[in-house]
Amino acid sequence: MLVENLVQLKDLTFKSFISEEKINARVIELANQLNNDYVEKSPVFLPILNGSFMFAADLIKHVSVNCQVSFVKISSYAGTQSTGQLKTLIGHEESLFNQDVIVIEDIVDTGLTLELILSDLKARGAKSVETISLLRKQKARDKDVAVKYVGFELDEQFVVGYGLDYDGLGRNLSAIYEQSMH
Ligand code: IMP
């Protein structure tokens, strides 16, 4: 429910944070950067589902170099050992060998997800692997996770909208909202 710039999703309230206009302008800047950096290349975009679907669609509309797009998902399943979860990348059947790969993320928080993805891609023999993320939180900056292209830098706040969810809800919002403590 959206009332006067406040969004209620289950037990949490969110307030306006990054407007649709700001997002659209930044997306065009990022696409232009990619168009410069990948001129005469033909990259493969790997948007990570679910969160990056809206960002990826808008970004790729403004990419003018020849490119491929293959949406992928992280599957996590309980490992055989008690140490926790194993995660793998599923969905791209094409060979990434010798390709210039661009991972599209919605948000990098601790960077753990991205580190897993990058090591998986390197093992597949990609020629180059770079990451573009709409948002990056403080923890990822502290850890120096390699994200070449970042839309907006955040502190630690929890955000929803433009593909990002809270408990499955909020992905449809066309702007980004941050959790409101009031
Ligand atoms: P990381 O492995 O800690 O970098 O987590 C990245 C994933 O956590 C993202 O792809 C999101 O799915 C989720 N995530 C992290 N922060 C937020 C947030 O503020 N809102 C919604 N999802 C988030």
Image: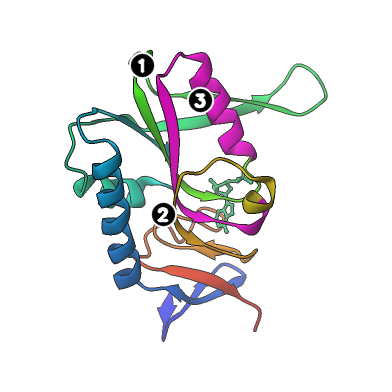
Q: Tell me the SS state at disc 1.
A: loop
The dot on residue 182 is none
Please identify the residue farthest to the right as the structure is shown.
82
Q: Is residue 49 visible?
A: no
Q: Is residue 152 above or below residue 47?
A: below
The dot on residue 93 is 1
Residue 80, how many percent across, how many down? Answer: 75, 16
- Which residue matches tag 3? 89
Residue 27, how many percent across, how many down? Answer: 31, 57
Question: Residues in magenta?
Answer: 112-139
Q: Is residue 41 above or below residue 27?
A: above
- Marks 2 and 1, how far apart in space? 24 Å
Q: Is residue 180 left or right of residue 4?
A: right
- Marks 2 and 3, how far apart in space? 19 Å
Dot 2 beta carbon under 8 Å from ligand 1: no
Q: Is residue 17 visible?
A: yes
Q: Amino acid at mark 1?
A: Glu
